[in-house]
Image (cartoon, rainbow, N blue to C red):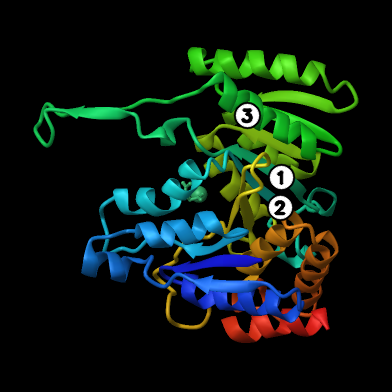
Amino acid sequence: MTIAVIPGDGIGPEVVPEAVATLEELGLGLRFEVLDKINAAAYLATGVPMSEEDFAVCTGSAGVLLGAIGDPRVRDPWYARDVLLRLRFELDLYVNHRPVALLHDRLSPLRDPGRRAVDCAIVRENTEGLYAGIGGVLRAETNDEVTIDTEVNTRLGVARIIDFALSVATRSVCMVDKSNAVPRGGGLWQRCWAEARARRPDLATSHLYVDAAAMALVRDPTAFDVIVTNNSYGDILSDLVAELAGGVSTAASANLNPGTGRGLYEPVHGSAPDIAGRGVANPVGAIASAALMLRQLGHPEHARAVEDAIRAAVARERCTPDLGGRLSTAEAGAAIRAELR
Ligand code: IPM
Ligand code: MG
């Protein structure tokens, strides 16, 4: 099995080698093809965000492991679109699965101990909504400028993400929308939700508007199992829950198409240019994303072993300073691999 590896920008090239080394430690015989021309430096030199050859490597691989895309030298928003959103859209990775569990008690910002043990997942629609890129500009760069970004919601897109959420939940699913203010797309989400939840009477189901969901998540995140929502609300709520569980540097994500089996796996944190190149970036998000990949590739026991090793290393404060440790990126990665052995 070949894994395409895109270290990307910022701290991506620091954290991704730790994830690759962790996968190699397991001795599963995975082959890695590192695509080192998909980054801002290459883009600034050549004007090409991702070559067709590199795109073909991604489509031909069993999974794509990505660090981060984004660099302050590139102001053009099409750069991230032409790499990350292109992979999500063209591989039809319609699920963005972002599970979150508190790594260690000391990492929770919540005072009440009974409310700290976050263990939930944001299931984010990943190929439409406000990210569809439908819109236009009128009278560009004048005082009368008008810009329009259209939110796209399709019956197929909404129904399939709700089905995925129901398929991975063990306790409950909460559907989050803003149908009180955004009636057309919201109405479609409501109708798809009513049909889908009726088919799963065994699961507890609920609905919240996104503003109320943000409040409820901070008040008591332990009340949630799976939250299913659109592309934009999923982007925001996944950062919120990541922070409740120990910080966004620990959060993992899987961009999936359960039908084709394709997947792109990336830490939620982004390129963090302010700390890039200093060896202080936390590799937990990247290594946890590699664990999500192992689960999709049919190695659930190895995935669990990596997740347990992360927890064990964090419990012993064998981690980077943002989690209360003193280790560098490479040392923190090695500490997780030491727990694996
Ligand atoms: C994420 C990121 C991306 C998104 C950005 C980098 C385009 O914030 O994966 O959550 O908004 O989807
Ligand atoms: Mg985000």
Name the amino acid, label 2.
Answer: Val
For the point 13% across and 33% down, the residue is 140
- Disc 1 and disc 2 in contact, CB within 8 angstroms: yes
Q: Mark 2 = which residue?
A: 100
Looking at the image, can residue 186 be seen?
Answer: yes
**Dot 2, how many residues are within 10 Å of its Cα: few (below 14), some (14-19), or many (20+)?**
many
**Where does label 3 land, which residue?**
212
Q: Residue 179, can we see it?
A: no
125 and 278: which is toward the camera: 125
Quadrant hosting residue 9: bottom left
Q: Which mark is residue 274?
A: none
Q: Residue furthest right?
A: 202
Tell me where residue 202 sits by quadrant: top right
Which secondary structure, mark 2?
A: strand
Disc 3 residue crowd, few under 14, some 14–19, many 20+, Cα 10 Å: few
Mark 1: few/some/many CA within 10 Å (<14, 14-19, 20+)? many
For residue 28, side relative to residue 277 (left or right): right
Tag 1 residue? 121
Question: Is tag 1's residue or tag 3's residue first in the polypeptide sequence?
Answer: 1
Q: Quadrant of the C terminus?
A: bottom right
Please tell me whether residue 265 is drawn above or below residue 171 in the rendered image: below
Which numbered disc, 2 or 3, marks the residue that appears first in the sequence?
Answer: 2
Q: Going 50% across and 13% down the picture, which residue do you hit?
A: 183
Left or right, 119 with reference to 279: right
| CB under 8 Å between discs 2 and 3 | no
* Mark 3 residue type: Ala
